[in-house]
């Protein structure tokens, strides 16, 4: 069956409205354009994100439903609390974002990762512009896990995570949820649901409701210290 997919112009950064996205494949909205920072920020502000495989044109997506995490109600399993008490992983914010982005790609096989060199450069540039942020998890002086994403006011758009040691990415996400909520954050966009996210308590919102929520929260600010480079102390007690 032939489908119509809009092609983005190189000289402007607007997108078709998300409701025009295809049902199959779920959320595919447009192709083309480039990964200029203005285009990527315009996409996230509209509930759209880039995702494509090597050899494909740049594809832009806005799926429905949308996977989300509420940082206020994130409740790790007792086993994870017990593990962290024993392991004592250290957690930091924005200490080495470029390295986190690189490891999110290099720790996967070529067939598993969508983080090609062009995408990595784009997010690393967004980091230097103050839009992209990372959480790092450490054991001794070695980085063993982490995640990164894009800030949109009181929403954080999670992009990717990696783990080199048991539970490292889970503990990084747990620490970020605590930290983000304490600084005024209200929602973490996880894009597409998968079993790992479901096991962590992710829920789904229909696209229209997600866009409505984004339209409000993207203009509200978290505490300015939220994304300062720092070490994060994880509260291990049950809420």
Image (cartoon, grey):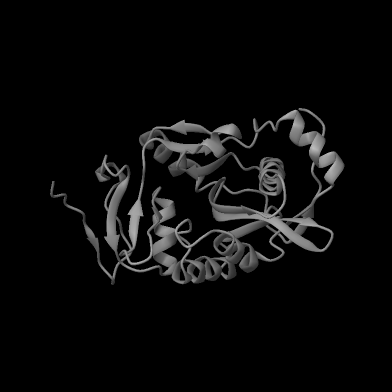
Percent coordinates x, y for residue 53 in the rendering: 38, 60
Q: Where does residue 101 sit, x and y in percent of width and height?
A: 58, 63
Q: Is residue 71 above or below residue 226?
A: above
78 w.r.t. 47: above or below = above
Location of residue 215 by image quarter: top left
Depicted 214 relative to depicted 4: above or below: above
Query: Where, by quadrant of the figure, is residue 75 drawn?
Result: top right
Q: How many marks?
A: 0
15 or 79: nearer the viewer: 79
Horizontal side, residue 113 vs residue 154: left or right: left
Q: Where is residue 132 in the image (x, y as percent from the top left)?
A: 57, 60
Q: Which residue is drawn at 29% across and 44% down?
A: 25
Q: Is residue 235 visible?
A: no
Which residue is at 75% across, 36% downward? 80
Q: In which quarter of the image is the C terminus?
A: top right
Image coords of residue 87 (percent x, y): 83, 45
What residue is drawn where x is 68% and y is 46%?
Answer: 176
Q: Nearer the viewer, residue 88 or 233?
A: 88
**Does any portion of residue 61 appear in the rendered image?**
yes
Frontmost residue, 195 versus 202: 195
């Amino acid at each position: 069956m032939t489908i119509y997919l809009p092609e983005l112009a190189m000289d402007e950064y607007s997108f078709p409205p998300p409701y025009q996205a295809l049902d199959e494949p779920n959320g595919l909205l447009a192709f083309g354009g480039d990964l200029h920072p203005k285009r990527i920020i315009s996409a996230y502000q509209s509930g759209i994100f880039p995702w494509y495989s090597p050899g494909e044109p740049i594809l832009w997506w806005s799926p429905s439903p949308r996977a989300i995490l509420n940082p206020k109600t994130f409740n790790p399993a007792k086993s994870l609390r017990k593990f962290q008490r024993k392991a004592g992983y250290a957690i930091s914010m924005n200490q080495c974002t470029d390295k986190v982005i690189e490891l999110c790609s290099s720790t996967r096989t070529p067939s598993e990762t969508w983080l090609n060199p062009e995408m990595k450069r784009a997010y690393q540039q967004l980091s230097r512009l103050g839009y992209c942020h990372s959480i790092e998890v450490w054991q001794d002086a070695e980085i063993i896990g982490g995640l990164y994403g894009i800030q949109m006011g009181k929403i954080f758009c999670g992009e990717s995570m990696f783990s080199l040691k048991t539970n490292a990415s889970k503990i990084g996400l747990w620490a970020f949820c605590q930290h983000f909520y304490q600084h005024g954050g209200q929602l973490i966009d996880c894009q597409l649901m998968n079993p790992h996210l479901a096991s962590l308590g992710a829920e789904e919102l229909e696209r229209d409701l997600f866009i409505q929520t984004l339209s409000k929260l993207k203009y509200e600010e978290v505490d300015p210290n939220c994304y300062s480079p720092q070490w994060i102390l994880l509260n291990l007690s049950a809420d």
